[in-house]
Amino acid sequence: MPSLYRIRTPCVVLPAIYGQCLSIKFAPLPTALWPERALRPTLESMNTIDEYNLDVRALSVLIAVHDTGSVSRAAVRLGVSQSAVSHTLDRLRQALGDPLYVKSGRGITPTRYTLQTVPHVRQLVDDLRALSVGPPFSPAQAEFTFTIAANDYQRDLLLPPLMHTLRETAPGIRLQVMPSGIPSADMLRQDICDLIISPHPPAVGDVMQRGLLTDQMTVFYDPHKRQAPANLADYLHSQHIGILFATGERMALEGALQAQGLARDIAVTVSNFSGLPGFLKGTNLLATAPRRMSEHLLKEFAQAPLPFTIKPFTLLMLWHQRNQDDSAHRWLRQQLVAVARHLTD
């Protein structure tokens, strides 16, 4: 089935399927909700209809911006660049004849037209996506094993609540978790795993991605043994716990420091984040780790901002494009998105 659905107001027209053109009529919005320009294809001339054709992906951008209230957060959710979201919004403005969002302080505010239109657009997108989901998927009756590659930070943050959801709604689906290290595309291409959770997406065209949540590296320490590092010199002169993943890669932090000509004094190296608490407790060592680890693994320790600039990172879920439209795979991705959204609410 073609993946691009073109929408005309007030009907949806799909490309030729099995040699026939399929046109699906939807109940139109009240004309008072549509700007004059959006009505012209119907009232004036169908010769200009191509200018107003919209695809599901563009409408999904409108929904993401509306849900997140931000172009940058919408880009993270969709796993695309901010410029791609801004370009799509410009195209939607031209097609719909409305600003959609206006600047308000440091953020954006939806117009009245956007507030009235998004619920209808959401329903249209859901209806169109339902046409291409393939065979019906019943979580309650499904029985299979789903393999997720994730290092211990991602594993402990996201997968226990996902497993709780599965036990309640899909008891026949079993999770298998394996370490991801710095993931490669072959892990997905060769069916070593079904999904990867990582901030390091392979730079290839056949791996799909979607942002789950953002986090920031911070420094943890035992407050009974020392104070937070006062400055960069104090941080560098302190001894640290380093991480060398079992797959042979180090944290991106090491590369960021090396790029500035800096290096830490590593007193002990562990193979994953789970090894940090035992070496941190009762010592004056420092451990640099994601801030959200203060919610579980490192909750008994104090934390402080790093004394140098390092960009936040986004945890992504990655999957191979052949599973893009698989109904079971899509359902599991949706559950993981729901888990991440709950953590950020």
Image: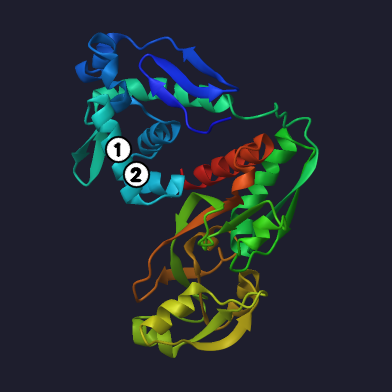
On the image, the x and y values in percent for residue 108 come to: 25, 39
- Amino acid, disc 1: Leu
In the picture as drawn, the residue positioned furthest to the front comes out as 19
How many other residues sit within 10 Å of disc 1, few (<14), some (14-19) or many (≥20)? many
Residue 141 appears left or right of 36: right
CA gap, disc 2 to disc 1?
Answer: 6 Å
**Above or below 120: residue 43:** above
Q: Nearer the viewer, residue 224 or 339?
A: 339
Please tell me whether mark 2 sits on a helix, a strand or a loop.
helix
Q: Residue at x 32, y 20 (%)?
A: 116
Q: Quadrant of the N terminus?
A: top right
Residue 98 in percent (x, y) is at 22, 27
**Location of residue 154 by image quarter:** bottom right
Give the left or right position of residue 244, taking residue 59 as reference.
Answer: right
The residue that appears at 69% across and 42% down in the rendered structure is 164
Q: Position of residue 171 (x, y in %)?
A: 78, 37
Residue bearing the label numbered 1: 89
Total numbered badges shown on the rendered structure = 2
Q: Mark 2 packing: few (<14 Cα in 10 Å), some, or many (20+)?
A: many
Query: Is any part of residue 18 visible from this angle?
Result: yes
Residue 272 lies in quadrant = bottom right
